[in-house]
Amino acid sequence: MDDPDAAAQPRPCVRCAEPCVLWVVGRCADCMADLYFHHPEEYRVFKDDVRREYGTKATS
Ligand SMILES: [Zn+2]
């Protein structure tokens, strides 16, 4: 694990409400894939949330 904040603990997804271990700024892995493939506008919002959450650390 290279991310110390990534606790392996299920949390409900803010989008589909499914408990999920793989969870990034509120969205589960399924939703991330759904956003990427089917909702490009929403995916852009998600990416902005990621940038806000992790700041410039994520770009290095
Ligand atoms: Zn979800």
Image (cartoon, rainbow, N blue to C red):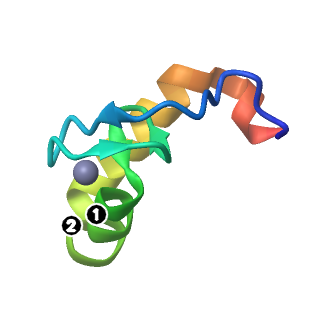
Residue 43 image offset from top left, x and y in percent: 32, 56
Q: Is residue 31 left or right of residue 9?
A: left
Which residue is disc 2 drawn over?
39
Dots 2, 1 in contact, CB < 8 A: yes
Identify residue type, mark 1.
Leu
At 42% from the left and 36% from the top, the residue drawn is 48
At 49% from the left and 35% from the top, the residue drawn is 50
**Disc 2 to disc 1, C-alpha distance:** 4 Å
Which quadrant of the rendered structure holds the N terminus?
top right
**54 or 3: nearer the viewer:** 3
Label 1 secondary element: helix
Q: Is residue 57 left or right of residue 49?
A: right
Tell me where residue 41 sits by quadrant.
Answer: bottom left
Which residue is disc 1 drawn over?
35
Identify residue type, mark 2.
His
Depicted 49 relative to depicted 36: above or below = above
At 61% from the left and 24% from the top, the residue drawn is 54
